[in-house]
Image (spheres, rainbow, N blue to C red):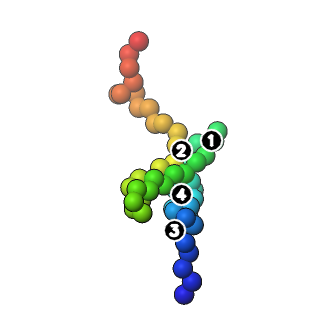
């Protein structure tokens, strides 16, 4: 069994997050790593605004 190095492992996690993005203008995925542990993943997405939470002008 071949093992991948840590950098490629973290990049694969970020790429998986990237595939979850749904924004047509910009697309990114992130994996924040602290002391060798992934503490956060994220991706770009379109904000959902519902009428109940919309601020009245």
**Furthest residue toward bottom:** 1
Number of residues whose C-alpha sits closer than 10 Å to that of mark 1, classed few (under 14), some (14–19) or many (20 or more): few
**What residue is shown with label 2?**
44
Which quadrant of the figure has residue 15? Answer: bottom right
In front of the other: 53 or 28: 28
Q: Position of residue 10 (x, y in %)?
A: 51, 62
Q: Upstream in the sequence, badge 3 or badge 2?
A: 3
The residue positioned 57% from the left and 83% from the top of the image is 2
The residue positioned 47% from the left and 50% from the top of the image is 42
Measure how far apart labels 4 and 1 are at the Cα level: 15 Å
**What residue is shown with label 4?**
14
Q: Quadrant of the N terminus?
A: bottom right
Which quadrant of the figure has residue 5? Answer: bottom right
Q: Position of residue 9 (x, y in %)?
A: 53, 67
In front of the other: 1 or 52: 1
Q: Position of residue 21 (x, y in %)?
A: 55, 49
Q: Upstream in the sequence, badge 1 or badge 2?
A: 1
Q: Quadrant of the C terminus?
A: top left
Q: Are marks 3 and 2 in contact (CB under 8 Å)?
A: no
Q: Upstream in the sequence, badge 1 or badge 3?
A: 3
Number of residues whose C-alpha sits closer than 10 Å to that of mark 3, classed few (under 14), some (14–19) or many (20 or more): few
Q: Upstream in the sequence, badge 2 or badge 4?
A: 4
Residue 41: in sight, yes or no?
no
Q: Are marks 1 and 2 in contact (CB under 8 Å)?
A: yes
- 39 vs 16, left or right, is left
Measure how far apart labels 1 and 2 are at the Cα level: 7 Å
Measure how far apart labels 3 and 2 are at the Cα level: 24 Å
Q: Upstream in the sequence, badge 4 or badge 3?
A: 3
Measure how far apart labels 2 and 4 are at the Cα level: 12 Å
Numbered circle sitting on residue 7? none
Between label 3 and label 2, give the one nearer the viewer: 3
């Amino acid at each position: 069994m071949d093992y991948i190095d840590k950098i490629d492992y973290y990049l694969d996690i970020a790429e998986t997050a990237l595939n979850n993005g749904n924004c047509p203008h910009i697309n990114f995925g992130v994996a924040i790593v602290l002391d060798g542990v992934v503490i956060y993943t994220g991706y770009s997405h379109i904000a959902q605004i519902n009428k109940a939470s919309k601020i009245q002008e």
